[in-house]
Amino acid sequence: MRPLVLCCLQILATVVSAEPAALQRPIVLDQTPVMNPVGPVVPPADQPKRPEPPPSQGGVLISDVMGRDRSINIFAGFTRDVGSVSSRLDNSSLNSTVLAPRNSAIEKLPRKPWEDPEDYKALGADAYEGGDGRDRAHRNIRRFVEAHVVPVSPWTEGEKATALLDGDRQIWWEMRDGIKVLQPDGIEIDSTASQVGNGEVWVLNGVRNYA
Ligand SMILES: *[C@@H]1O[C@H](CO)[C@@H](O)[C@H](O)[C@H]1NC(C)=O
Ligand SMILES: *[C@@H]1O[C@H](CO)[C@@H](O)[C@H](O)[C@H]1NC(C)=O
């Protein structure tokens, strides 16, 4: 089972390596010697207010924001491992709605996203051994990621769409008792994490059953 562990470690390494930059940014800001540390939080009335950030984030792309929300950083790591998807999320002329399952939803899966029961049936416990095994695991991760990226944004309620995964069935979303639900799977959509120039990242409280 060593390759599985290696695969897992690689993904963890991706996740962990994404963290220091995010942690450093606020520290750098804190060093700006402008604020009196014991001064009032609200600026005095005679100081001009800072301008609001522009409402449109046209220049910011999904690839820029995917790693910022730590509750989805396992899925964000997967997307970086799939070239066709990561280049799409980095392309300002291709819109997407990313259906990013929460870390906890991925951790709860009965099998890892790179495992396929069919592989074990055909090849036994060694299904992910060696170079072929690694390719197999990567192909399964790609299917998992492609099932969670919809090449449509804005995506309106009730609009039928198909994720990037070849041969996948149609999906849509609707409001049910004030909750946004992905159909036909019935998965709760927790929030719109980010809205940027080439689409949106939505956080799912579950994982699509796409097999
Ligand atoms: C972005 O997508 C368009 C349309 O598919 C493509 O023509 C273009 O080459 C892509 N740009 C990059 C930088 O990949
Ligand atoms: C892509 O998304 C932007 C931002 O929401 C939107 O203005 C634009 O119309 C979308 N393009 C397409 C082809 O849907």
Image (cartoon, rainbow, N blue to C red):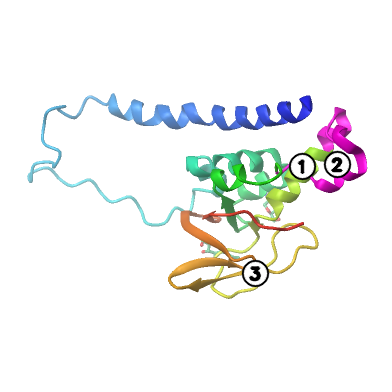
Q: Secondary structure at mark 3?
A: loop
Q: Which residue is mark 1?
A: 115
| Above or below, comparing residue 35 to residue 166 in the picture | above
Question: Residue 149 appears at what percent x and percent y?
Answer: 65, 55
Residue, x 77% and y 56% (percent of image)?
Answer: 211
Of the two numbered discs 3 and 2 in the rendering, the one whose residue sits closer to the viewer: 2
Of the two numbered discs 1 and 2 in the rendering, the one whose residue sits closer to the viewer: 2
Residue, x 42% and y 29% (percent of image)?
Answer: 23
Q: Secondary structure at mark 1?
A: loop
Q: Are marks 1 and 2 in contact (CB under 8 Å)?
A: yes
Amino acid at the residue labelled 1 = Glu
Amino acid at the residue labelled 2 = Tyr
| Above or below, comparing residue 149 to residue 161 in the picture | above
Residue situated furthest right in the rendering: 122
Please tell me which residue lies in front, 157 or 1: 1
Region rendered in magenta: 113-135
- Earlier along the polypeptide chain: callout 1 or callout 2? 1
Question: Residue 162 appears at what percent x and percent y?
Answer: 70, 65
- Earlier along the polypeptide chain: callout 1 or callout 3? 1
Residue, x 79% and y 38% (percent of image)?
Answer: 137
| Above or below, comparing residue 100 to residue 158 in the picture | above
Q: Is mark 3 within 8 Å of ligand 2?
A: no
**Is residue 20 rendered to the left or right of residue 13?**
left
Q: Which residue is mark 3?
A: 184
Amino acid at the residue labelled 3 = Pro
The answer to whether residue 55 is magenta is no
Q: Which residue is mark 2?
A: 120
CA–CA distance between discs 3 and 2? 28 Å
Magenta stretch, main secondary structure, is: helix
Q: Secondary structure at mark 2?
A: helix
CA–CA distance between discs 1 and 3? 24 Å
